[in-house]
Amino acid sequence: MMTKKIGTPSQGKEMSFISHLEELRWHLIRISIAVLGLALVAFLAKHFVFDVLLLGPKSQEFPTYKLLCKFSNMIGIQDSFCFKEESFRIQSRTVAGQFSAHIWTSITLGFVVAFPYILFEFWRFISPGLHKNERRNSRGFIIIASLLFFTGVLFGYYVVTPLSINFLGSYQVSEQVFNDFDLSSYTSLVRTSVLASGIIFELPILIFFLTKIGIVTPEYLRKYRKFALVIVLVLSAIITPPDIASQIIVSVPILILYELSIIISKKVLRRQAKRKEKGKI
């Protein structure tokens, strides 16, 4: 069985299904090499990765806490947003706990830094199967998707992570129960907050492609806007301290992304309609 080529070598040639899989395998191999290479760099920079990056949100000197404290004083609510040094301890209670946390944190950091290259490799795999005008219209895909992802990562690290750590680290069901967190639990919280935020910020890209293939429309997004609002508020209530200001800080960017997705969906349909009028589709 012969299919249309979706790979990088030999533009214009037909490739079998097995050839597609072989081509995909090499793209995945190059992606793995890039991620593991950057993970090795992160592994060697252990002190910076853990003492500065990973454990930074635990410190009172973290930039987010300073900005929120200044903001609360500026608007006249005194020290409402000023956070004290976290009283909880982080410990490792398994033999390989620290080494395992070191490995997975390095791999996660490698993936984050290599994200533009990962997109580039997948783009090299699928772009030959697209029409010329589709490749031209998607020219800025890698740049835009990477910027959205890194914006989400920064949002997760500087907003979601410190708010979550501050709330969960100080939360007690009883004064007789002390917070001594396991290293794997702490690192998992940071990694999840950062990666989840990065992926959520890819919402406009996802809506773009779903609109292109006819699964999503602007009307559909408007119809379920209120459900999206409820979901966002529930999620922000779970991951932030139980106060309105913190929930708004987390909710607003996600809601802006949702509204931006509606605009993108509308533009995609408008562009498709123009092409139909010109007889290009």
Image (tube, grey):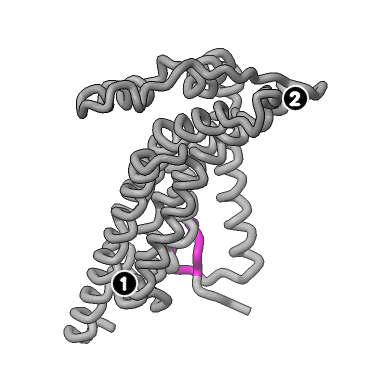
Q: CA distance from mark 1 to mark 2?
A: 47 Å
Front one among 3 and 63: 63
Q: From the viewer's perspective, is the residue at label 1 or at label 2 nearer?
A: 1
Res 97 quadrant in image: top right
Q: Kindly give the residue lying farthest to the right in the view shown.
A: 95
163 to the left or right of 110: left
Range of residues picked out in magenta:
5-13
Relative to 31, is 126 above or below? Answer: below
**Disc 2, SS:** helix
Where does residue 277 sit, x and y in percent of width and height?
18, 86
Res 197 quadrant in image: top left
**Disc 1, SS:** helix
**Magenta stretch holds residue 8:** yes
Front one among 110 and 105: 105
The earlier-in-sequence mark between 1 and 2 is 2
Q: How many marks?
A: 2
In this figure, which residue is indicated by the disc labeled 2?
Answer: 97
The residue lying at 49 percent from left, 38 percent from top is 194
Res 29 quadrant in image: top right
Where does residue 5 sit, x and y in percent of width and height?
50, 68
The residue lying at 21 percent from left, 75 percent from top is 270
Where does residue 51 sit, x and y in percent of width and height?
54, 15
In this figure, which residue is indicated by the disc labeled 1?
Answer: 222
The residue lying at 63 percent from left, 61 percent from top is 21
